[in-house]
């Protein structure tokens, strides 16, 4: 048996057991699971020969014998936010995160179980919708079970036309595990969504996530993604804009040791008069590796598009590696689009200035690094979340300061 066949065989065994435990589900859901696993089995895990994965080797995930486990989940929602009906789930689930070209999205759909499906009705909701998924050896409930666990959390949020809300997704855990997450967000016409994803996985964890967002006419979607932990992390973010809609896609990634983080984003201007802004910042130390691939797609009919994309990286170690590729694909002629990337180190003059005034080298490095990251943190509109992330960043950067 080839290694690839053996890897699929391991997942087939898990899928067979999963399907047996969930017999009697709605026919549409069973069909979705079966089609998704068939597609995963056909594709297999991506390799570095695939253009979209050439800087990220997922072999450590593919060769690990995981056991299936349902994620611990905490959901805090404002008053009047509802669960989606069966009919609404059938209409939306799996429509946006396509399984045809994404093996991990297909694997997630095959193991659909831990699903958060929320409907936000028209109105203004000041309290954030908080969704937390947690995994790890210390929460499995079986002290004799040593095999690492795999969880496939699924989130579907449908926001009604004219509604305004804030969404906070958090992923965390302990030990070695695999979190394979998919989030689908539908913004109705004129809706306003402020979204945050905080990824605080353990240093041994694998985290692969797909987020697909459909933004309605004249709607506004903002997302901030924080990647602050994990042995191997991959984030795929896709946003499709309708006429007159706008999107802000920002991110901050902090990697150290031998950690690897890969951010792939696609902002699809499908209709005219759309606006998008994207800023991703990365801080690399140790022997870490980071990848940024951001694509702005402007379709033929998307005239009057205004889009700006920037990736900035601060490299603190000679052994850290960053591969960055911002790109534009423009098929319209009346647009204004810019993109760019920078890679740099801490400013020597600033370090000298701070040290000459009695600040130690390690503390000076930490302060300058935190100032680089603060630009993203300051954009957080949820005070409690901003304070929490400032504390986490301070702790992580203090660890880096002695390198």
Image (cartoon, grey):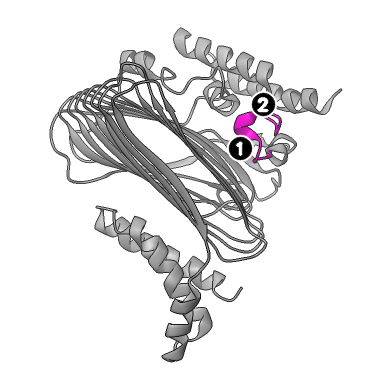
- SS class of the residue under badge 2? helix
51 is within the stretch colored magenta: yes
Quarter occupied by residue 238? top left
Query: In this rendering, does residue 314 appear at all?
Result: yes
- Residue with the most extreme right position: 1
Q: Are marks 2 and 1 in contact (CB under 8 Å)?
A: yes
Relative to 11, say whether 351 is above or below: below
Q: Quadrant of the C terminus?
A: bottom right
Q: Earlier in the sequence, mark 2 or mark 1?
A: 2
**Residue 313, image x and y in percent?**
50, 56
Q: Is residue 385 left or right of residue 175?
A: left
**Residue 276, image x and y in percent?**
31, 36
Q: Is residue 311 left or right of residue 193?
A: right
Residue receiving disc 1: 150
Residue at the spot x=54%, y=54% of the render? Answer: 229
2 is within the stretch colored magenta: no
- SS class of the residue under badge 1? strand
Q: CA distance from mark 2 to mark 1?
A: 10 Å
Q: Nearer the viewer, residue 367 or 212?
A: 367
Q: What are the residue bounds of the magenta stretch?
A: 46-57
Q: Is residue 25 left or right of residue 4?
A: left
Query: In this rendering, does residue 251 appear at all?
Result: no
Residue at the spot x=30%, y=21% of the render? Answer: 302
Relative to 258, say whether 129 is above or below: above
Q: Quadrant of the N terminus?
A: top right
Q: Is residue 2 left or right of residue 345?
A: right
Residue receiving disc 2: 14
């Amino acid at each position: 048996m080839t290694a690839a066949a053996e890897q699929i065989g391991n997942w087939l065994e898990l899928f067979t057991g999963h399907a047996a435990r969930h017999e009697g589900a709605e026919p549409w859901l069973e069909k979705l699971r079966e089609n998704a696993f068939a597609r995963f089995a056909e594709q297999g895990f991506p390799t570095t020969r695939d253009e979209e994965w050439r800087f990220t080797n997922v072999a450590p995930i593919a060769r690990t014998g995981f056991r299936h486990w349902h994620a611990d989940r905490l959901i805090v929602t404002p008053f009047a936010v509802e669960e989606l009906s069966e009919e609404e789930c059938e209409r939306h689930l799996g429509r946006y995160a396509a399984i045809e070209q994404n093996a991990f999205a297909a694997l997630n759909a095959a193991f659909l179980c831990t699903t958060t499906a929320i409907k936000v009705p028209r109105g203004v909701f000041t309290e954030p919708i908080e969704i937390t998924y947690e995994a790890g050896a210390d929460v499995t409930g079986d002290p004799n079970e040593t095999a690492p666990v795999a969880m496939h959390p699924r989130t579907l949020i449908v926001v009604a036309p004219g509604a305004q809300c804030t969404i906070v997704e958090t992923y965390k855990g302990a030990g070695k595990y695999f979190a394979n997450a998919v989030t689908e967000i539908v913004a109705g016409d004129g809706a306003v969504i402020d979204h945050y994803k905080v990824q605080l996985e353990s240093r041994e964890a694998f985290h692969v996530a797909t987020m697909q967002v459909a933004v309605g006419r004249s709607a506004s979607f903002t997302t901030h993604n924080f990647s602050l932990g994990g042995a191997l992390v991959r984030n795929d973010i896709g946003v499709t804009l309708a006429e007159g809609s706008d999107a802000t896609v920002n991110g901050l990634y902090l990697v150290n040791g031998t950690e690897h983080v890969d951010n792939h984003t696609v902002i699809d201007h499908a209709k005219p008069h759309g606006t998008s802004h994207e800023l991703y910042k990365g801080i690399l130390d140790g022997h870490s590796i980071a990848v940024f691939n951001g694509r702005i797609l402007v379709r033929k009919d998307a005239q009057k598009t205004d889009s700006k994309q920037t990736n900035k990286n601060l490299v603190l170690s000679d052994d850290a590696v960053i591969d960055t590729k911002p790109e534009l694909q423009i098929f319209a002629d009346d647009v204004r689009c810019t993109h760019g990337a920078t890679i740099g180190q801490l400013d020597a003059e600033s370090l000298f200035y701070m040290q000459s005034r009695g600040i130690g080298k390690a503390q000076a490095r930490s302060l300058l690094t935190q100032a680089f990251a603060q630009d993203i943190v300051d954009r957080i509109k949820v005070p409690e979340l901003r304070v929490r992330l400032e504390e986490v960043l301070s702790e992580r950067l203090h660890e880096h300061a002695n390198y």
